[in-house]
Amino acid sequence: MDKIQDITQTTLQHYERTAEQFFAGTIDHDVSQNIAALLQAIQADAPYRLLDLGCGPGRDLKAFKAMGHEAIGVDGSARFVEMARAYSGCEVWLQDFVQLDLPAARFDGIYANASLFHVPSAALPKVLRDLHAALKTGGVLFSSNPRGDNSEGWHGPRYGSYYDYDTWSAYLQAAGFVEVRHYYRPTGLPREQQPWLASVWRSVRERTEPQP
């Protein structure tokens, strides 16, 4: 765990140092396709109770709130938490992904846009089980990660894990999720020009232990 904690803290320190630059560089990104993918899969009655996992400075939190949903953010960067609270007006929790402390069966949907890929593979099964437990029965998890060949490691000061669809799917199924759909982004381009794998998953109450 110490090694995992060192990895996540080093990555978070990068975001602490570059928070304003990150905000300026991502505030205009169009992720409406991803937001719609989450919301369209939720079968409960709106407004929804949503968790934005790795909310950053609060761009998507603000969008969820503007749609009338009850959105709560969580991020491991104290600076991002401060910025997200101010920008979105939403409640935001300071938590490292590998040490999540979330209320049980609370959320209709969890939105993890470009965040879970920072979790080292050794910690991923527990993180996904924590998210599963925080969802209501039938709740939905959306994730978007850079796709890859199942390698992981440092890219400058940030750690990343880059999965192909089959490996990512195996992790989610082991944690108790069933797939709703998946797609690659940006849309309308050849696959080699689509670096993002987006997927939507529904929680079920049974889960299996992943194979070592």
Image (cartoon, rainbow, N blue to C red):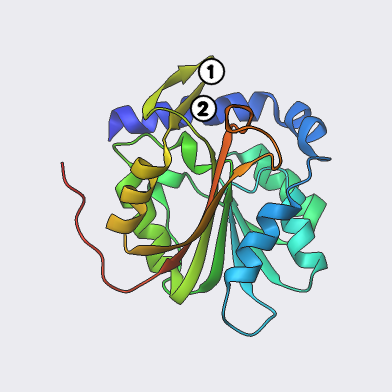
Q: In the rendered image, which quarter contains the C terminus? A: top left
Q: Is residue 65 rendered to the left or right of residue 152?
A: right
Q: Residue at the location (36% across, 43% down)?
A: 166
Residue at the far left in the pictured view: 212
- Return the mark for residue 157: 1
Residue at the far top in the pictured view: 156
- Closer to the chain start, of discs 1 and 2, is 2
Q: Residue at the location (49% across, 72% down)?
A: 139
Crowding at dot 2, Cα within 10 Å, few <14 / some 14-19 / many 20+, comes out as many
Q: Given the image, on which type of amino acid does mark 2 rest?
A: Thr
Report which residue position mark 2 lands on.
11
SS at circle 2: helix
Q: Position of residue 25 (x, y in %)?
A: 79, 30
Q: Residue at the location (69% across, 62% down)?
A: 36
Depth order, front residue of 183/87: 183
Q: Is residue 89 visible to us here?
A: no
Badge 1 vs badge 2, beta-carbon distance below 8 Å = yes
| Vertical placement of residue 178 versus 189, above or below | below
Find the distance from the CA under tag 1 to the CA under tag 2.
6 Å
SS at circle 1: loop
| Vertical placement of residue 167 versus 93, above or below | above
Q: Residue at the location (46% across, 28% down)?
A: 160
Q: Given the image, on which type of amino acid does mark 1 rest?
A: Pro
